[in-house]
Image (cartoon, rainbow, N blue to C red):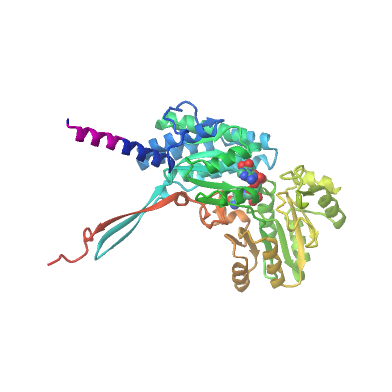
Amino acid sequence: MSNLSLNENLIRQVVSQVLAEVTRGGGVAASSYTTSSYAGRHGVFTDVDQAVNAARDAFEQLSQRGMEDRRKIIEIIRRISVSQCVELGTMEMNETKIGRLVHKIEKLKTLGEKTPGVEFMKSECFSGDHGLAVIEHAPFGVVLAITPVTHSLPTITGNAVSMIAAGNAVVVNPHPSGKKVAVEGVRRFNEAIKREVGIDNLISIIAEPTLDTANALFAHRGINMICVTGGPAVARAALRSGKKAVVAGPGNPPVVVDETADFDRAARAMITGAAYDNNLLCIAEKEVFVVDSVFDKVMQAMERAGAIRLNSGEVDRLTKAAIVKVGDDKHDAPCKDFLGQDAAVLAKAAGKSVSDKCELIFGEVDESNPFVPVEQMMPFLPFVRVRTFEEAVAKAKHYEHGFRHTSIIHSHNVKHMTYMGRVLDTTLYVKNGPCMAALGLGGEGYLSFSIAGPTGEGVTTPLTFTRERRCSMIDDLWILGKPKS
Ligand code: NAD
């Protein structure tokens, strides 16, 4: 072999090593990129670098597999979420101590069954005089998922299904108050995926998550994309990260009821939505504006449908107990002792005794009551009396705080529906149903528990976690074209 070809070989080796590093981390080699195997860890890590490296290894293995293996992996996640929903849902309830057991269980089952998978992976194609262009949707690589306490494992189930369907690996930084169930779920997913498909750590998780681990992951060169599901602070942090971020942020969904609504149907829908998991859903009804001429009828319909009404003294007592001042600016926030607790617990604080079976309490408030602007996440629904439909919509817009998350109307006036839809400009807009109908639960459409308002992706799907690639054939393969003479 000549000196020249030896050098060429050396150069080729170095170039291919550098290319491999760049593909792994999107930048210059970082000390954290090791080649050691993390097989057998089943995704559970305390060290951020190890978690990212293990997910990167898993991503590279997944990249060598076809769509059929992605489908198998997703089936495993679905199977565990559905078949173990009682055990894992109970674990989540015992750990987080917020919400309702029946819904903790149901959420795992629903996310397992209904999250969009590989069937959403479609390519687009353009053909014409100049040949053929195919647009395909490629994985980003390793996606960071930050998940909320309100649905710890269900959010991981949904994120993992969609992200892996798109060909990615996932690193999860769960909420510290829901970390145990998150780790146990992820361990079970990985253990089965390793056994049945041969890849470990496709979902890596930080077992002791903190704000420091979150920040280290935001900045990590091995993370290619971020998806956060949570409140304002994490939404802001993700947008500052300098990485491609999908932000599923907070909401404060208003409801408007006008003169033309079916009041009994509206009442049933509001109870179903606002009481679900004790109002922990980000899409859940949080405050209601009702036109004066039908206000009393709507309140009576709520009572007929099983909600219990508080009088003004009781509302005042509940407000003092359940809304507290926090932060340097002393802003109103839900008191942790009441967040996600049962209606009977809230009623007791209001000085009223109600049955454990009561799902929702409600009452008339002035718009200055903090339950109106605060995302309370409690099964107490405040009702505000307004003079006109236009005033209802204006107040709904004001108290939605510009999140553009979710809004709901009960009406049979199509002009009113159109007007409110245009003014509120929210990602989800429900007419004549409970909030969850917008996620295909009693309405049409598909489901995700990461609804990206601020960054605009809406209800996330596998395509949310992809990058477009175009493959162009010039002047050929347009088989409909006339042969060139
Ligand atoms: P949270 O904001 O307290 O926590 C969410 C996650 O972000 C947790 O993992 C937490 O540890 C992390 N976090 C918080 N502050 C952070 C920071 N400064 N830097 C890095 N990470 C940070 O929210 P929560 O109480 O767990 O969940 C409820 C909130 O999430 C509500 O505001 C609700 O509307 C929102 N949410 C939105 C969606 C959606 O799809 N848009 C879905 C579920 C919940």
How many numbered discs?
Answer: 0
| Residue 272 placement, left or right of 53 | right
Residue at 62% over, 62% down:
432
Quarter of the image with the N terminus is top left
Asked if residue 5 lies in the magenta stretch, the reply is yes
* In the image: residue 462, left or right of residue 336: left
Observer able to see residue 148: no
Give coordinates of residue 404: x percent, y percent.
61, 60
**Residue located at (27% from left, 34% from top):** 10
To which quarter of the image does residue 267 belong? bottom right
Main secondary structure found in the magenta portion = helix
User: Is residue 321 found left or right of 190 in the rendered image?
Assistant: right
Whether residue 347 is visible to the viewer of this picture, yes or no, is yes
Is residue 259 positioned above or below 437 on the image? Answer: below
Q: Position of residue 470 (x, y in %)?
A: 34, 55
- Residue 302 pos. (x, y %): 74, 58
* Foreground pick, 474 / 407: 474
Residue 399 magenta: no
Residue furthest to the front in view is 3
Q: Is residue 483 left or right of residue 212?
A: left
Tell me the magenta residue range.
2-13
- In the depicted structure, whether residue 428 falls above or below residue 350: below
- Where, quadrant-wise, is the C terminus in this rendering? bottom left
352 or 201: which is nearer to us?
Answer: 201
Q: Residue furthest top?
A: 40
